[in-house]
Image (spheres, rainbow, N blue to C red):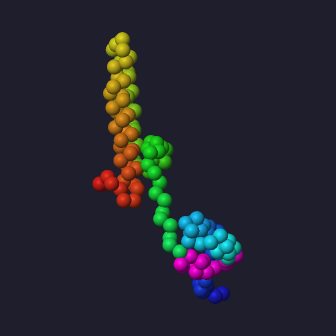
Amino acid sequence: MDDKIPARLRASDGDRERVAEIIQAAGSDGRLTLEEVEERLRTVYATRYADELGELTADLPRPAPVRPRGGGWPLTRAALREHPALRVHLGIVAVLATLLIVRWAVGGALFFWPAMPLFWLFLSLVVHARVRAFRQRPGAPVPY
């Protein structure tokens, strides 16, 4: 049996979609006419080999990658799974919150005095998660 590597690789659907996005972006920027966009897209979806796809976008600039915007909730299950230090911080906050609430319940105070310490503990956890999220982004403004 001959185990030679083929000289040409077949294009995947993902390869075709990436090239189609570049062509559509060039069309929306006015770099290609509607007829050129339609012709190139027809060719993209009929292409079998990956090296043929490069020829369709050789005269077009690559679109800048879209950076995800911050602002989402930083304390997600995925963030806790990826960062053991964040899990440790969450555990410490949970233990301290439990101790504060138990102390309040045993002490018999008329007002809920642990509210302020709990607020600052929770805020420290959110800030920790935010700093971790900034550090993961390319071109992170927060130093390591």
Is residue 12 visible in the rendered image? The answer is no
- The residue at the point 54 percent across, 79 percent down is 58
Q: Which of 91/129 is in front?
A: 129
Is 58 inside the magenta-drawn segment?
A: yes
User: Quarter of the image holding residue 42?
Assistant: bottom right
Measured as percent of width and height from the top left, residue 87 is found at 40, 43
117 versus 109 height, above or below = below
In the image: residue 85, left or right of residue 19: left
Residues drawn in magenta: 45-59
Query: Which quarter of the picture shows residue 47?
Result: bottom right
Residue 141 located within the stretch drawn in magenta: no
Give 30 or 42, whichever is nearer the viewer. Answer: 30
Residue at screen point 34% across, 19% down: 113
Residue 32 position, x and y percent, is: 59, 72
Instruction: Look at the picture and state if 66 lies above or below 100.
Output: below
Q: Give the camera-side residue of 124 and 64.
A: 64
Residue at (38%, 45%) from the top-left corner?
Answer: 130
User: x, y percentage for residue 18?
Assistant: 58, 68
Please determine whether, in this image, residue 95 is positioned above or below residue 132: above
Extreme-left residue of the structure: 143
Q: Quadrant of the C terminus?
A: bottom left
Which residue is at a point 36% across and 28% down the rendered structure image? 118
The answer to whether residue 141 is left or right of residue 21 is: left
Q: Position of residue 115 (x, y in %)?
A: 36, 24
Most common SS among magenta residues:
helix
Q: How many marks?
A: 0
In the image shown, does 27 or 126 lie closer to the viewer? 27
| Quadrant (top left, top right, bottom left, bottom right) of the N terminus | bottom right
Res. 11 in view: yes
